[in-house]
Image: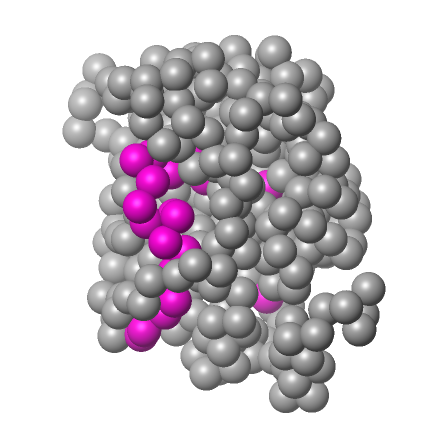
């Protein structure tokens, strides 16, 4: 076994069964040689909680979150969950998507990402990042595999953008959204801020054709795991049989020669991308602009400032 290669664990899973998912996490941790002892550590789960609007499929499935939470709790961790949705709070989205109910009685704490730390990224951009995401002992990224009208697809790397405070995310869209490549560079810079982490992608039922809020379901029957989000995304692009160069995030990752950018530098200790059939997955052919319409931006700011007016 070549230990110099990054590992991506791809496993087959056909349904959202909590005990099954818990078992898949156990297998992924073993295959990735994670030697961390979680007893007493603070573990933060960061699912995709994009919005309380749109279809349920747009967020990480409640039982996927529940299964991952159960594994870490079984290993003695103090589990927290949080995200910074575009509009509203992570708690409100958890309530809407059934995640709150799924985690009831488990002792999982809800974290408000509004408490932020100001950081200057490697590319020189200053952002407000969730204190909870930076100060936890272990960060668990739980992206949903889905199409994205602005970024082609959204998976492990794009989901990390959620550690940025909601209002700051909107400002980044406005100020740096003139270029897909520039915006992708900012997201990739965020990866460097993370504490030790594990990335587990919910690809059991993906969302394709459109997104990130309004696509349709496609059964991929896959759960992907890695300690490197770039490698996980590269593997999933291969699995979906998509043209990688159409992904702005992948283009910038390869331009920077980031580890995990190329499939031949990835080791698959379980299943390989070829063991799945992703050719039915459809991603947007033409990407929308990242910069928000100014009127829509102002409307969104009002909604954030006065959410009760739009409830």
- Image location (x, y in percent) of residue 16: 69, 22
Q: Does the magenta stretch include residue 284?
A: no
- Image location (x, y in percent) of residue 132: 39, 48
In the image, residue 231 above or below residue 117: above
Report the side of 310 relative to 139 (left or right). right
Q: Depth check: 195 or 122 in front?
A: 195
Q: Can residue 214 be seen?
A: no
Q: Depth check: 59 or 28 in front?
A: 59
- Image location (x, y in percent) of residue 200: 48, 32
Q: Is residue 140 magenta?
A: yes
Figure quadrant of the C terminus: bottom right
In the image, residue 273 above or below residue 155: above
- Image location (x, y in percent) of residue 126: 32, 73
Report the side of 161 relative to 191 (left or right). right
Report the side of 166 relative to 163 (left or right). right
In the image, residue 238 above or below residue 108: below
- Magenta highlight range: 125-150
In the image, residue 32 above or below residue 108: above
- Colour setup of the view: one colour
Residue shown at the point (47%, 19%) measured from the top left: 73
Give the residue furthest to the bottom.
294
Residue shown at the point (43%, 37%) measured from the top left: 44
Residue shown at the point (22%, 15%) measured from the top left: 1
Q: Can residue 233 be seen?
A: yes
Q: Quadrant of residue 202?
A: top right
Residue shown at the point (68%, 35%) measured from the top left: 100
Q: In which quarter of the image is residue 255?
A: bottom left
């Amino acid at each position: 076994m070549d230990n110099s290669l990054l590992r991506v664990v791809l496993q087959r899973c056909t349904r959202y069964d909590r005990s099954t998912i818990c078992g898949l996490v156990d297998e992924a941790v073993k295959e990735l040689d994670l030697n961390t002892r979680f007893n007493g550590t603070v573990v933060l789960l960061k699912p995709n909680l994009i919005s309380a609007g749109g279809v349920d499929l747009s967020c990480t499935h409640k039982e996927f979150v529940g299964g991952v939470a159960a594994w870490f709790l079984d290993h003695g961790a103090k589990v927290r969950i949080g995200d910074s949705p575009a509009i509203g709070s992570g708690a409100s989205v958890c309530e809407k998507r059934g995640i709150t109910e799924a985690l009831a009685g488990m002792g999982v704490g809800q974290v408000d990402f509004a408490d932020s730390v100001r950081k200057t990224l490697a590319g020189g951009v200053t952002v407000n990042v969730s204190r909870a995401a930076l100060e936890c002992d272990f960060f668990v990224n739980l992206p949903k595999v889905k199409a994205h009208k602005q970024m082609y697809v959204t998976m492990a790397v794009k989901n990390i953008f959620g550690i940025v405070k909601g209002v700051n995310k909107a400002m980044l869209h406005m100020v740096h959204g003139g270029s897909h490549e520039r915006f992708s560079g900012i997201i990739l810079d965020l990866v460097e801020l993370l504490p030790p982490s594990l990335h587990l992608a919910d690809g059991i039922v993906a969302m394709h054709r459109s997104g990130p809020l309004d696509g349709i379901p496609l059964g991929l029957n896959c759960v992907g795991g890695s300690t490197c989000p770039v490698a996980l995304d590269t593997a999933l692009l291969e699995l979906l049989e998509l043209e990688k160069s159409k992904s702005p995030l992948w283009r910038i990752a390869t331009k920077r020669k980031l580890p995990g950018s190329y499939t031949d530098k990835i080791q698959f200790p379980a299943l390989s991308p070829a063991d799945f059939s992703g050719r039915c997955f459809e991603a947007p052919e033409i990407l929308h602009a990242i910069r928000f319409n100014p009127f829509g931006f102002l409307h969104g700011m009002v909604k954030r400032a006065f959410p009760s007016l739009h409830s």
